[in-house]
Image (cartoon, rainbow, N blue to C red):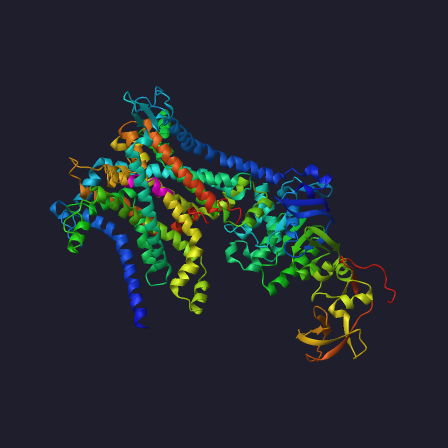
Amino acid sequence: MTTTVTAPGLRAARQETGLQQQRARAAFWFLAPMLLMLFFVAAWPLFRSIMFSFTDATANTIFNGQSEWVGFDNYLTWRVRDNGDIRWRGVLADPDWWNAVWNTVRFAFVSVTLETVLGLLVALVLNAEFKGRGFVRAAILIPWAIPTIVSARMWGWMLNDQFGIINDLLLQLNLIDSPIAWTARPDTAMIAVLIVDIWKTTPFMALLMLAGLQMIPRDMYESAKIDGIHPVKVFFRVTLPLLRPALMVAVIFRLLDALRIFDLIYVLTPRSEGTVTMSVLSYLNLQQFGDYGEGSAQSTLLFLIIAVFVVLYIWLGRVDLSGERS
Amino acid sequence: MANIQLRNVTKTYGAVTVIKGIDLEIRRGEFMVFVGPSGCGKSTLLRLISGLESISTGDMYFDGELMNNVMPSKRGIAMVFQSYALYPHMTVYDNMAFGMKLGGSSKSEMEARVRRAASMLQIDHLLDRLPKQLSGGQRQRVAIGRAIVRDPRVFLFDEPLSNLDAALRVQTRLEIAKLHHEMRDVTMIYVTHDQVEAMTLADRICVLRDGLVEQVGTPTELYDHPNSIFVAGFIGSPKMNFLDGQFAAPHGCATLGIRSEHIDIVPQGAGLWTGTVIHAEDLGSDNYLFVDLGAKEPVIVRQPGKVAIPEGSTVSLMPRAGLLHRFDESGRPVQAPLAAE
Amino acid sequence: MTASSIFWNVMFYIGVALIVLVAVFPFYYAVLSSFETGTQLFIPNYLPQSFDLSNYTSVLTARSFGRSVLNSVFVASVTVIAALFLAVTASYALARVRFRGRGLLLMTILAVSMFPQIAVLSGLFELINWLGLYNTPWSLILSYTIFTLPFTVWVLTTFMRDLPVEIEEAAIVDGASPWIIISRVFLPLLWPALVTTGLLAFIGAWNEFLFALTFTVDESRRTVPVAIALLSGASVQEIPWGPIMAASVLVTVPLIVLVLIFQRKIVAGLTAGGVKG
C-alpha cells in the first residue's frame, strides 16, 4: 500500500516496534529446537532413505559406505538379452510390488469407506439423547484404547480356524458349514484385516464426527421439526452439509493412516499374499532380506504417493491450517 | 503526566489501511475519549499508543520522547481491557502485583502500592480471591486496580464498560470519573462507541471516522458546533434531525440539522413546518414526538414533562432561532451567514 | 406413543446394544480366555467358566515381560516429556506470533505427522547406528519423536490459539517477556491441555510397533507390543494363546482405565488434533 503512504512516513515504513521485534526473535528461538529435532529425526532420515533407493545397499554394505550408486535401477531398468528380448527389472516391474499396491489401495478404500459410514451412524446414535449415553461413549472408546498389536492378537484368537469363537458363532447360526481359516486363506485374510481395522478405528471416526455434530446448533433441528421436515431430509439437507468439514478432515486423516498400515497386517496375517501392503513389503525387503536398495525404493514410492495425497488435501481442502482466517 | 503527540500516524495491515494519517495532541492530565462507529479505527489507535501494535508510518511522542519503537511496558502506560483480562490462575493481589514483581520491585513497596490501589477502589477484602470468584463489576475494578498499581503516566481504557450491565455501567462510569479527579496529572485515553460515555467522561472527545480524525473538541463544542454532518449525527441522543431538499433550500444549505430539544410546538400556523404526529414515546421525564413533515424521515421533537398530544394530530413546529445547523453537499457546515436570518 | 414410534425406539436401543456389544466383546473374550488353560481354552464359550490365574503367573514370572513393560513405560514417558518440552515453546510461537511462513511451517509439521514411518526407516537405521544407539531405549525415544513431536505441537498450537488475546496483552503491558508469558501465564492455564496431549502422545508411543521391532533385538530391550507380537511357543504351530491373552489384558487394562478417566479431555484433544476445518 505504498500509494497511501506519504513522503515523510516512508522512513519508518519498514520499521517494526521493539515489541514485534522481540516477539519475532523469541519465536525464532522457540521454534529452533523443535525444527532442529524434526530435521534430525525426519528430514535427514527421509533424505538418506531416498538416497539408499538409488544404491545397491544391502545389510552388509549399508554402514560401511561400500554400496554403489545405481541410479534408477531399483525402480526400473531393462536389459536386452542375447535373443533380443527385453527384460524389465526393478520395483516398478515387480508383480509383488503391484500386488502390494493393489492390497494397500483396496484396504484403504474399503476400510475408510466403511469406517466413515459406520462412524457416522455411531455418531448419530451418540448425538441423540438417551439414558446411558455416557456409558455407550465410554464403551466405544475401548477398541480405540487397545494397542493395535493387542487387538491383532485378540482377533487372531477369535478368528482362529479351529478354536475361534467367530467360527463357532457362525457355525451355530448355520451361516457356514465348516470352519474358515480366516487369517490364512488368501481370499479371507483381507476380510479379517478389515474387520479388525474397522472395529478398532470406527470409534475414532465416530468421536471426531460427534464433535462435528455437536457444533451444529440444536435450534436448527428444532426449527426443521416445527416446519415438519422429514428427519431423513433434515439429515441430508442440514446435518450432512454442516458436518462436511469435520467429515472431510476425518476421512483424509484416516486415509493417510490406512495407506501406511503395517503393524496390524504384520501380526494378524503374516506371510499372506492377499494382505501384504506397501509398508509390509518394504519392511520385509529391508529387514528380512536386507535389500536396502529395493526396500528404500518401495518406501520412497509410498512416501511419494502419500505426499501427493497430503498436498491434494491441503490444496483442495483449503483447510485453515494456520488459524489466520478464523 | 504525559503529553502525547501523534504526527501523521498510519497503520496498515497487509493491503488494508486502518489508520490513515492522524495528527493529534493529547494534553497532560487530560481525559481524552476516542469515539466513533465500529471499524473507525479507535481501538487500533489506542493499541498504537499502547505499543501493542506498531505504527506503520508517522511518529508518536510522549513528552517529546519518540515512542515508535518503545516496548509497551517501557512507555509508562497501563491498560484496562474490555474483557478485564485478569490472569485467571492468580489471586487479586497477584494480579495487581504481577507487573511490579516482573519489574523487580521490593516486596514492601509492592504491598504498599497494591493496598493503596485496593483501598482506592474498595476491593481490599477481595485481595485473596481468584477472578472467577468475583462479579463482573468487581473484576473490572480489579482490572482498574492493576492499572493503578503500575503508576502509569498514561491510562488507557479499551471499552471497559461494554461487558457490564446497564446499572453497573453507570456506577463504574462514575468511578472512572472520580479516578480522573483523584489522579489529576495522569493522562487518560478512553475508547468507546457509546457517545453518552464520551460526553459524560471526556475533557475532550476525538471523533474518528474511517481511520481519520473527524473532529476534536470538548463535549460542548462537539454538541454545539459539530463541524460535519457525521459528528452532528453521532453526538447527541436522540440523534439530530436532518432535513434536506425543500426544507433545507430556504436556509441556503443542502442539509439542515436541528436537535430534537430545539424544536418547539407552536399554535397552528405559527410554525415553520407542519406535520402529523405518527408516534409518541413517553420516557417519563421527556416526551419524544415523531412528526412526519413529508421529509425522508420523521422529525423527533423532544418535549419536557407530560405533553398530551395524541398520535395522528397535526402540529406546527418552530425551530429555535440560531440553533439550526446548516451543512453543504459535502457535509461541512455552511459558514456564510444567511441573509434572511 | 404410536406403534411406529415404539418400533423405532426399540430398534434404536437394539442398535445401541449392538454397538456396545461389538465394541466390548473382543476385550471381554480376551479376559475370558486369559483365565482358561488346557483344553478348556480350546472350547469356545461365551460366559466365564473358569478362573485360572496360571496364564498370568506364567507371563509375570517370565522375566522378559516385566522388562518389556518397564521398557515401554520408560520409552513412552521420556518421549512424551521431551516432546512436550519442545512443543510448548514452539506452539506458542506458532499460535501467538505472526511471522511470514507460519502457515507453511504448520503444514510441514502436519505433513511430518502423516509421514509413512517406513519411508524414514532405512535412514533412521543408519542414523541410530551412527549414534551408537542401536538396541537401546534411546533409539526408540529418538525415533518416536518423529510422530509425537508434530502431534503435540499441532494439538498444543490449537489449544494455545484459543487462549484469550487480552490476557497476553495485559501481560505484555505488565512487562512480561515471551518466556514469562509462557511459563507464568499460559502454562498454568494450559495444564489440562498438556495432560490430554501428553496422554495421547503416551498412548501413541506405547503402541508403536515398527520402530520397536526394527531397532531392538534383545528380548530384554523389547517394548510391550513387540513382546506380545513375538510371544511364541516351542514351535510355530503352538501359539501360547492363554499367556498371550493374559499379557494383552495386562497391558490394556491400565490404558482403558486412563482413557475412561480422561475420556472428555481425550475427545477434546482428538478433535483439536483433527484440525478445526
Q: Quadrant of residue B11?
A: top right
Query: Is residue B305 within the magenta segment?
Result: no
Total number of numbered discs in the rendering: 0
User: Looking at the picture, does residue A161 appear above or below residue A235?
Assistant: above
- The front one of A245 and C253 is A245
What secondary structure predominates along the stretch shown in magenta? helix
Query: Is residue A259 within the magenta segment?
Result: yes
User: Looking at the picture, does residue A189 appear above or below residue B195?
Assistant: above
Horizontal and vertical percent for residue C64? 24, 35
Camera sees residue C250: no
Kindly give the residue lying farthest to the front in the view shown. A84
Camera sees residue C92: yes
- Which residues make up the magenta segment? A256-264
Horizontal and vertical percent for residue B95? 55, 50
Q: In which quarter of the image is residue B121?
A: bottom right
Question: Residue at horizontal 68%, vertical 50%?
Answer: B211
Quadrant housing the N terminus of chain C: bottom left
